[in-house]
Amino acid sequence: MTTTLTAEQAQAQKEFRAFADTRVAPYADAWHRAQRTPPEAVRLLADEGLLGLPVPAEYGGGGSDAVTLGLLAAELGRACSSLRSLLTVHTMVAHAVARWGTRAQKDTWLPRLARGERVAALAVSEPGTGSDASAVTTRVTRDGEDWILDGHKKWITYGETADLFLVVGRGEQGPTALLVERGTPGLRTELIEDMIGIRASMTAHVYFDHCRVPGENLLARPGLGVSHVTGAALDLGRYTVGWGCVGILDACLDASTDYAAERVQFGVPIREHQLVRRMISEMYTSARAARLLSLEAGRLRDARDPGALAATSTAKYFASTAAARAATDAVQIHGANGCGPDYPVQRLLGDTKVMEVIEGSSQLHQVGLAEYAFQERAPFRRTPAAAARGSECPMTTTTETTTETTTATTLKTTTVKCVVWDLDNTVWDGVLLEDAEVTLRPEVVETLRILDERGILHSVASRNDHAAAMAKLEEFGIAEYFLYPQINWGNKSESVQAVAKAINIGLDTLAFVDDQPFERDEVAFAHPQVRCIDAVDAAGIPDLPQMHPRFVTADSRERRHLYRADAQRNAAEESHEGTSEEFLASLGMRFTIGPAEERDLQRAEELTVRTNQLNATGYTYSYEELDAFRRSPDHDLLVAGLEDRYGTYGKIGLSLVERGEGVWTVKLLLMSCRVMSRGVGSVLLGHLIREAHRAGAKLRAEFVPTDRNRTMYITYKFAGFREIAKKGDIAVLENDFSRIPEFPPYMDVTVGS
């Protein structure tokens, strides 16, 4: 977790704090009592460029990163949650327009929103619709080129004064999003007063009575109003609300420590009372934890990491619930004074209760976070037995570190290891759950066959009924092609991520095929390193340069079958009731180590290119280079293979040792991620240790840290290596032979010569 701010972020935080302390905090209680935010306060935010802070610079905004936006939300939240709410709803709408708007919509609205010439509000909630946004009842009807809105929205933050509303209603094709300007005939608002918190936020009813909206104000296509438009907006809203709660925690801590230092009871300041200290210590730790979680969420958002969704939900849930506890304790510390209008803690208490409700209630986040937990620990990712062994390959490829070292454009030139397919109007013509019949596309079948022969895998990411879709794939005779199919009603980006984790490959080695540009955009936004392909180009996919591995080896031709055997092993491990070692012993594993032969070189090159997480140096070698090492009298190039009762794993390990006078140096050590859960990760390294010790030579190893291979460093450390020197990026490790490893008892190891 990175917690350090850049110099620019630290300076921005300093400026935001000064602004909040001088221009907002002194007036917050007055605005709270008046239940109004004065227009000059809104104008002040706009003039300072704060309303447009995250709007892309090309449209006149600040183009800020997510962390900087969060820092602003925290400082405004510390000073006045009502004004922070304006930042939240305004940037939610701006974000939705930037993400889903047409070029004309962006050109029209983003500059105005960035300058604060128009203030925006999100109109989704209704009297009978809250967390379940898909249940909206406001009607959206097409009338010629226009849209007609009829309905009633409620709890719309700054709805009383907003100039532009992003409205979600229900149309013939599902939830539909429209941009509606104040002043449109049929639109009226009514202020909601006497709320428990954020009383200055001008929250309102918004009514639509045959409200006619121009056709060009449709945001995204019909049917995507909740899943795409509102989903993106609310995700940003959760993020800034979470940061706003960080600010509330700071405000509670400031107020409580100041008051406890001055208030005297029983002859001493109440700061000396242990139970007061307990409450303040809880505030202090909660404030620090909430800030760290929010920083992590911001960092992941800036990196476009798919984990940002879970991190944002985690931060919002923790910060809002912690702020509610802190505000309760702050009032308790203030005693009767905390219940009156002279101290800000009474305002903070009401505000925090609202924070536990808006942008996803605490209970909704609990349900969602539990689902994230189950997904992250699903059996095909990391089984309990494998976790107990502690030697399994990491199942997560972090996007943020990948994008820090290379551009998305560069990543998309990486050889593809797996193609992830949509189904409806992609693999087949038609929509399975709507059409009487769907027809398999012959060009897709041919593409599946060609890529499979090259060792490129296939999977599925489809919004569909799982049982019906799998039955249709079986009927068409192509179900065997698809590994770990993700057929559900979730986002395609989450399904693509699940495929990468299940197969244990990087997102930069995936391609995604879909007929819908919105689906491709959603995946590209979440995973910019994934190559997204229009389904109309399916026939040409085999011709893409990324679909041509340099060599097609015997192992690569069997790759799909190897992975299917892995799935059988994993299923057997899940159902096994004995210990981990008992299960491993039941596999009858046979591990072979021997000098590389000429016929092994293509697979050896493939291993250096394909293996990133378990390559100790990150080096790749060509066929010609490996052949030279194979022939060299000063080098040992070894390959390792593995098989068990389910079949062969193929060639799964490679080492290159340079034999000098009295010193052997491991120049390359790698192991396929597919076999790490079998407890074989240290076998090849153990063999090298034994051989060097027998020869009376020192054994050293080179390690070059990359963004993925920390597991190999840990493997070296557990094997008794320690760092003795540093040569630029290369760490030189040496084994002291204090313990000579034995081969695992559940494995038959054969060493060739």
Image (spheres, rainbow, N blue to C red):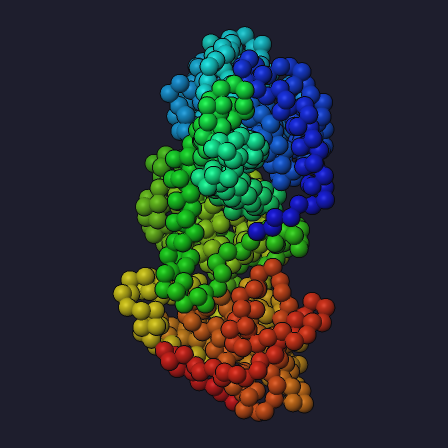
Q: Residue at x 44, y 75 (%)?
A: 642
Relative to 553, residue 221 above or below? above
Q: Is residue 364 visible?
A: yes
Quarter location, residue 11 = top right
Please state the horizontal and vertical placement of residue 299, each as a whole percent of the image: 60, 45
Using the rendered view, name the quadrant where residue 108 is placed.
top right
Q: Residue 741 location in percent, x, y?
A: 47, 82
Q: Residue at x 41, y 67 (%)?
A: 389
Left or right side of 584 for 50: right
In this picture, residue 17 sits left or right of residue 417 = right
Q: Position of residue 342 (x, y in %)?
A: 54, 20
* Residue in the foreground of this view, choosing between 172 and 31: 31
Residue 521 picture location, percent across and down: 56, 39
Picture mark count:
0
In this view, the residue farthest toward the left is 577
Residue positioned 56% across, 64% down in the render: 710
Q: Quadrant of residue 169?
A: top left
Q: Nearer the viewer, residue 66 or 614?
A: 66
Which residue sits furthest bottom?
Answer: 695
Residue at horizontal 57 percent and vertical 64 percent from the top: 709
Q: Is residue 180 visible?
A: no
As drawn, 573 above or below 116 = below
Please identify the residue farthest to the top as the structure is shown: 185
